[in-house]
Image (cartoon, rainbow, N blue to C red):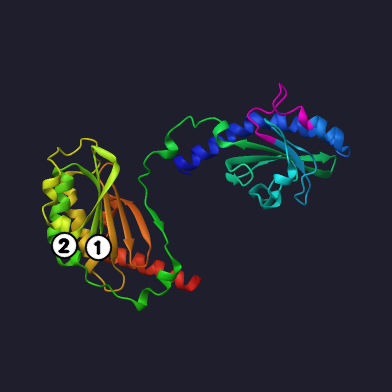
Amino acid sequence: MNDFEKTIELRKATLLDAIREPLAHVANQLQKVWHSPAQLNEELAQHIGSANSVKRCHQIYVFDANGTVISEIFSKKGVVDKNAVDDISSRPYFSEALPTAGMHLSRTYTNQTTQQNCVTAVQTVRDNSQVLGYLAADFILDDIGAATTAAATKDRREWVQMKGDPSIRGTLFMQSRTQSVMDETLDDVNSIIEELILKRGVFHAKLHYSSSRATIWLYDDPYHYRVHNIQEILNDVLLAYPKRDYPKEANVPPDVIVKVFAAFRELRDVDETIYLRAGSLNIINGMIGLNFSCDGSHYIPYEEFLDKGQSFWIGAAGSTATESESES
């Protein structure tokens, strides 16, 4: 389990620890009055927006095994009109396996009635060995507290492979690479992009070979990206960006830049069917991005990328396409 997954699980566990005992208490009280709708609603009303409320709960209600809400829906703003509520049988917590005992926390979803992102805790209401129904407590994400660690959103320097559009992969061997303007001037383009990174403040550059364009991000203005077509790249683009020292925060050594773009060129030229459509380098997090003609994508630390040869990448891309054909 990586840091991203650990952080998500920690937030879920923290919420569950806070609500497990209160919801179990409410369910125990509901069991006693389950067959009296009036008493059921009276009991539920005590647990929203009062001293006895389940902390941070946005809505609370009960439903049966068919997904029918059998109580009023109580919210912090009052009783909700059930006619305005979307069919809860379509909500994730209902389509997921309902618990036969204890509590289950749903995945994050958008409540189609309130248009808010939330999670729902589902607590089983039992009478001895019989499941009577379920108590649901909705929690809006903004109300359940912030993550206590930034580990989930930090750079993950690990190799990730993603399959693309099956329709592209399925017709891969019916197409071949078309020489682009960028392909015809790739030595010049590589030299220019390398200087933009090494001397002119670009920390992330992506070359789109098939469409002959480059997308770049500047260290001093990271919130805006620039797109340059091949004419702009070749016609003195270097004059537009002032000289800047190579950033100290970079995780990619300067002497590696040329090797990366040389490897991109090799993957562009190595095969007429399986070839690189776009390649990117981010020198701050040290990650390479690759998109192949089969629409398969890879995100990989630069060290691992440079350790792999042509045959590996073409084999990996071809394998992805073949797998997709066999699955379709």
Instruction: Give yes or no for contact between labels 1 and 2 (Cβ–Cβ under 8 Å).
Output: yes
Asked whether residue 319 is in view, the answer is yes
Judging depth in this view, the residue of 140 and 93 nearest the camera is: 140
Residue 99 visible in the snapshot: no
Label 1 sits on residue: 209
Instruction: Farthest residue to the right: give it.
Output: 36
Residue 77 drawn at (x, y percent): 68, 31
> What's the residue type where badge 2 is placed?
Leu
User: Residue 213: which quarter of the image?
Assistant: bottom left
Query: Could you say which disc has been placed on residue 186 in the image?
Result: 2
Mark 2 lies on a secondary structure that is helix
Q: Position of residue 155 (x, y in %)?
A: 36, 41
In the rendered structure, the answer to whether residue 151 lies left or right of residue 273 reads right
Q: Could you say whether the residue bearing mark 1 is in a helix, strand or loop?
A: loop
Q: Amino acid at mark 1?
A: Tyr
| Residues in magenta, as a range | 44-59
Q: Is residue 73 above or below residue 88?
A: above
How would you rate the neighbour count of disc 2 (Cα within 10 Å): few for under 14, some for 14-19, many for 20 or more? some
Main SS type for the magenta part?
Answer: loop
Q: CA distance from mark 1 to mark 2?
A: 9 Å
